[in-house]
Image (spheres, rainbow, N blue to C red):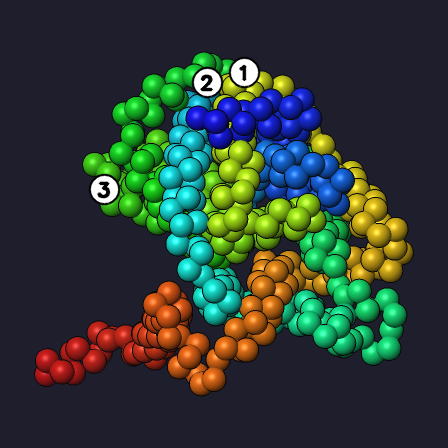
């Protein structure tokens, strides 16, 4: 009870409440702008949050992270253009409902399902984080190294059809983390006698380049457009009642979202497709899916909004981010010397409790805002894309320069921005680079520490948790190789033709 009161006291600070309000409402607006997304906004705001108190900075970023997918459903339903990439499945059933004159019903269902998924995942976070934190003290250097390695492996394998490219980009991220002074003996690595490389390649510079500047360049080089005007008539609160009739779909979809959110590298896309597939197979009217099915809409929105809260579980309990946005948040923890892990739950439980309450409150703020301000929001987002790109570019360079007052950082960020634009044009993933940098740094430090007590290869897995993690890694690799072999067999297997069957019958 004392922890709850203390956490409430932290949350009740005016700075925290203002950050929560700005993050929540701002995240909805950013999510509703096609072509921007939470990653760009968080990348731009990241340098500014370093000067705030840790709870203020994290609340602002969590507000954007947790609310952007609410906003992304609006253009997906009304104009068949997902505001964020993870709202793509929402277009399958949301837009057909709009064409039938049920836009208000589709939006209301999407808001209600998003709220249900968000709150469900936060309750799971509250329950599971302390349990994982109880196991976490048994994680030594070897176990954390293996967990981080498994995270990179899952991130790479999650990019089906682009596994090799994702692996190369993850290795690039690991390499970028090694540039500069190494963390034990402080010798120079890959600096080529250039003094500006001695301090290494800053994660925030890379994040701003790959996410924000590249997106700004993409908006600037593409044709100038603006979201078409739209207006919604009708009561947007009806979805809360309708959701009660679809509670099974909402609960299972949210559970899938929580499970996928906890696994590094999997995230919203996989949870959405699994939830949508489950909803379709268990539905009494599967033929309606893709034609305006409320069940399909609820499944996709509940699943993707359950991921942010679940992604915080490995971050808070083990200090291991599962995707790019939580990797950015990890840097806020480190800047303020707040180290995620078991000690966080032991020494700063009031801080953790304040985070929990902030996450629940942000979902309430977003739901209330959307139920009563959707038409106002539709007017706000009428921004031409090139003007948007110019603003993102300007704010990105201001953010980069504010880090260390360095023009070199601005040039590096510009270089990574062009590189990010090339990757986006080639449809290659950017996330493996960021997770390679973050998890690569964790892996290097823990491997150096572990090797002091390892005399033979088997010593590395002589403890139960290490052995389980090693077996999981081997199982993941074997399953992936098996799936590749099956795909190859299916490709080369000749399909029977009518002539062949006639010949065999004769």
Q: Nearer the viewer, residue 215 or 352?
A: 352
Quadrant assignment for the C terminus = bottom left
Give whichever of discs 2 and 1 has the lower sequence position.
Answer: 2
Give whichever of discs 1 and 3 has the lower sequence position.
Answer: 3
Question: Of helix, strand and loop, which one carries label 1?
Answer: helix
Question: Of helix, strand and loop, which one carries label 3?
Answer: helix
According to the image, label 2 marks what residue? Answer: 236
- On residue 132, the disc is none
**Location of residue 322 with respect to 77 vertically, above or below:** below
Name which quarter of the figure residue 377 lies in. Answer: top right
Q: Nearer the viewer, residue 492 or 369?
A: 369
* Residue at image location 68% in from the left, 45% down from the top: 336
* Residue at image location 64% in from the left, 28% down from the top: 16
Quadrant assignment for the N terminus = top left
Total labels drawn:
3
**Location of residue 138 with respect to 273 vertically, above or below:** below
Q: Residue 216, image x and y in percent?
A: 74, 48
Q: Is residue 348 left or right of residue 235?
A: right
According to the image, label 1 marks what residue? Answer: 372
**Location of residue 234 with respect to 334 vertically, above or below:** above
Alpha carbons under labels 3 and 2: distance apart: 27 Å
* Residue at image location 72% in from the left, 32% down from the top: 383
According to the image, label 3 marks what residue? Answer: 282
* Residue at image location 87% in from the left, 60% down from the top: 408
Alpha carbons under labels 1 and 3: distance apart: 33 Å
Q: Residue 339, image x and y in percent?
A: 59, 50
Name which quarter of the figure residue 255 lies in. Answer: top left
Q: Is residue 485 left or right of residue 215?
A: left
Q: Are marks 2 and 1 in contact (CB under 8 Å)?
A: yes
């Amino acid at each position: 009870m004392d922890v709850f009161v203390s956490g409430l006291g932290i949350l009740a600070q005016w700075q925290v409440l203002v950050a929560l309000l700005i993050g929540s409402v701002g995240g909805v607006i950013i999510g509703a702008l096609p072509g921007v997304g939470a990653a760009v906004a968080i990348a731009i705001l990241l340098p500014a949050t370093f000067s705030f108190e840790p709870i203020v900075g994290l609340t602002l970023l969590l507000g954007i992270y947790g609310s952007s997918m609410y906003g992304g459903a609006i253009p997906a339903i009304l104009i068949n253009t997902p505001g964020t990439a993870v709202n793509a499945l929402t277009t399958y059933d949301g837009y057909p409902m709009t064409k039938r004159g049920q836009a208000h019903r589709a939006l209301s269902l999407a808001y209600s399902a998003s709220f249900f998924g968000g709150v469900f995942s936060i309750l799971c976070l509250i329950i599971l984080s302390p349990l994982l934190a109880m196991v976490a003290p048994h994680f030594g250097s070897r176990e954390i190294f293996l967990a981080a390695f498994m995270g990179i492996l899952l991130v790479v394998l999650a990019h089906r059809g682009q596994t090799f490219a994702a692996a190369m980009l993850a290795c690039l991220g690991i390499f970028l983390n090694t540039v500069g002074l190494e963390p034990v003996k402080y010798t120079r690595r890959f600096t080529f006698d250039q003094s500006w490389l001695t301090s290494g390649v800053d994660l925030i510079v890379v994040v701003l380049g790959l996410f924000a500047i590249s997106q700004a360049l993409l908006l600037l080089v593409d044709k100038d457009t603006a979201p078409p005007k739209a207006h919604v008539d009708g009561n947007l609160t009806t979805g809360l009642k309708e959701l009660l009739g679809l509670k099974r779909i909402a609960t299972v979809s949210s559970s899938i979202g929580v499970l996928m959110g906890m696994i590094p590298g999997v995230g919203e896309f996989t949870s959405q497709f699994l939830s949508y597939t489950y909803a379709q197979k268990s539905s009494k009217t599967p033929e309606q899916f893709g034609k305006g099915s409320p069940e399909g809409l609820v499944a996709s929105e509940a699943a993707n909004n359950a991921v942010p809260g679940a992604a915080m579980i490995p971050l808070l309990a083990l200090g291991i981010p599962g995707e790019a946005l939580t990797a950015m948040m990890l840097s806020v923890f480190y800047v303020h010397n707040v180290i995620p892990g078991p000690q966080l739950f032991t020494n700063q439980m009031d801080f953790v409790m304040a985070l929990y309450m902030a996450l629940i409150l942000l979902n309430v703020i977003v739901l209330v805002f959307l139920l009563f301000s959707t038409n106002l929001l539709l007017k706000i987002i009428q921004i031409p894309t090139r003007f948007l790109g110019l603003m993102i570019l300007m704010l990105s360079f201001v953010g980069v320069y504010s880090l260390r007052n360095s023009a070199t950082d601005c040039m590096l960020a510009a270089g990574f921005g062009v590189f990010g634009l090339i990757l986006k044009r080639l449809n290659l993933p950017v996330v493996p680079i960021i997770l390679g940098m973050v998890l690569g740094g964790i892996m290097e430090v823990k491997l150096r520490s572990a090797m002091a007590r390892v005399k033979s290869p088997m010593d590395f897995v002589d403890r139960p948790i290490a052995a389980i993690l090693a077996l999981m890694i081997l199982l993941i690799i074997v399953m992936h190789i098996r799936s590749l072999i099956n795909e190859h067999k299916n490709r080369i297997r000749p399909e029977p033709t009518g002539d062949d069957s006639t010949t065999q019958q004769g």
